[in-house]
Image (tube, rainbow, N blue to C red):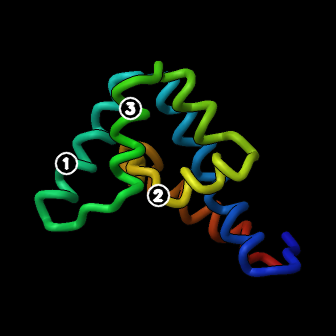
Amino acid sequence: MTFTHPHERNDWIALAMARIVARRLRENPALVEKGRERILASRERGRDFSAYNEWEEIIRKLPVAAIAELLEAQTEEGQRLRSSRPFIGPPFILDEERRAILESAFAE
């Protein structure tokens, strides 16, 4: 992959990972609750980000299909939400999948 700016690479990585997460959420809607649990766990560790308030509201109000669409949206809002998504690591994206995306992003 060739990127003209480091932000393009980061955006591509976030979108590639978000597509996997969106697919997993569609396949197993119960995973959305795990995202909410990650927000709560982060707060218990003293890490409370304003973006998590927004994600908590999204999780509470939107159906899984709409959450998946937000994750994949190639808009400013989608990009912004991907930068703070609570759906990270297993079970949302496996380490092997993450490594493959990073390898693709940094391949010359």
Tell me if residue 11 comes above or below residue 4 in the rendering: above
- The C terminus is located in which quarter? bottom right
Depth order, front residue of 29/67: 67
Residue 61 quadrant? top left
Packing grade of label 3 (10 A; few <14, some 14-19, many >=20) is some
Measured in 3D between alpha carbons, the distance from the residue under mark 2 to the one under mark 3, in whole angstroms, is 13 Å
The x and y percentages for residue 30 are: 33, 24
Residue 40: image tag: 1
**SS under mark 2:** loop
- Please report the residue visible at 59 percent of the width from the left and 41 percent of the height from the top: 71
**Proximity of marks 2 and 1: CB atoms separated by less than 8 Å:** no
Type of residue at label 3?
Answer: Ile
Q: List the residue tagged with mark 3.
A: 59
Q: Residue at x 66, y 40 (%)?
A: 72
What residue sits 34% from the left and 40% below the top? Answer: 56
Q: Which callout, 3 or 1, points at the residue further toward the start of the chain?
A: 1
Give the crowd class for mark 2: few <14, some 14-19, many >=20 residues within 10 Å: some
The residue under label 2 is: 84
